[in-house]
Image (cartoon, rainbow, N blue to C red):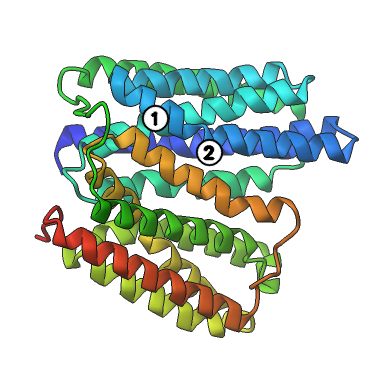
Amino acid sequence: MKKLELKIVLIYSIIHFIVDLSCCILIVNLLSNKIDNKLILFTATIIYNFFAFAVQLPVGIIADKINKNAIVSAIGCILIAISFFISSNPICATIIAGLGNSMFHVGGGIDVLNISNKKATLSGIFVSTGAMGIFLGGKSVSINFNKYYLIILILIISAIFLISLYEQIKEKVKNETMIIPNVNLNEILIIVCLITTVVIRSYVGLILSFEWKSKFILALISILAVVFGKMLGGIIGDKIGFLKISVISLVFSAICFIFSFNNSILGILAILFFNMTMPITLTALSNILNNNKGMAFGLLTLALFIGAFPTFFGYNKFIFNPIGLFSITIISAIILFIGIKKYNNLGIEKVE
């Protein structure tokens, strides 16, 4: 890995952790402590997720064209910092924080994909760190309000780092996009398969409330499984091919899910294997969409929002049983197999 590539992915990955940690602290602590009306809190949560995930699609399309990715990410950090100051207005705060989160992810995602050379390793590293931020943010209910000023300071420093990064790479890392992605019917089928897989992964990932996760150490290890699953998926996928890692990881995950309710080790392995396809779907979609990387990132985060939507209304137990998790994971494996098989026929991926 070249020095510049390493620098870019490290900066974005660290700030990804900071951004998701900050947003989760805002939602879980500041807003929930200030809102007594459960309906308003519920509405604010949905609004946040809409702006943080679904809005990444239009933001990504715009970012593809303006080619100022680190600046877009820096503005995102600043918006999240601002959201803490206006938390007395929960709806406005969630909109601003969600938009900030969206802008950071899009800018960082495009820059990392730009240096990835159609490979999945770097994108796997970038997307992995957010899970830990969300986990720790959710565990921070006892943080004193004065500590929020430290978070705001860290976000501002992050924005300064991103602006500095932009000045260093603006002539070296550029977007190469088409106004309208030129895709045929075969590629549309691939895109549908990739998006469907992400919808399933989003829903399943949110319903995995195993009893053994009530123990902090096991919950922490399960989040580390998410982090390392995404990292390893990209690394191994580049070595053995997107098709092999997709099918192998999901089949192993399905088998482990059968025993995951009574065995925490197999449950953790199921989570690790299940998350390996994350960088594969992102990289494949980016490669198909004629390098419209922001659009690719936005389509998949829209899929994340769609997959999460049923959980907002309490549909968490629909398939949360050994047979249900096994079945939905195998279905996901079949869908992704079809998509990646056809993707390989395009001749884009070259395994080294």
Q: Residue at label 2?
A: 53
Instruction: Name which residue type carries label 1.
Output: Gly
Name the image quarter holding residue 280.
Answer: bottom left
Residue 260 in view in this figure: yes
- Label placed on residue 60: 1
Where is residue 337? Give x, y as percent: 31, 70
Q: Residues within 10 Å of mark 1 (few under 14, many from 20)?
A: many
Spot occupied by residue 99 in the image (x, y as percentages of width and height): 55, 26
Front-most of residues 305 and 207: 305
How many numbered circles does the render carry? 2
Residue at point 53% right, 58% down?
Answer: 223
* Residue at the image position 53 percent from the left and 56 percent from the top: 202
Q: Amino acid at mark 2?
A: Phe
**Badge 1 element:** helix
The residue located at (61%, 22%) in the rendering is: 96
Q: Would you say 39 lies left or right of 253 here?
A: right
Left or right: where 151 falls relative to 292: right
Residue 260 vs 277, above or below: the answer is below
Q: Percent x, y for residue 77? A: 50, 23
Is 44 on the left or on the right of 279, as rendered? Answer: right
Q: Quadrant of the C terminus?
A: bottom left
Against 350, is 329 above or below? below
Near-viewer residue (134 or 290): 290
Question: What element does badge 2 sit on?
Answer: helix
In this rendered view, identify the residue nearer to me: 137 or 182: 182
In x, y percent, where is residue 113? Answer: 26, 39
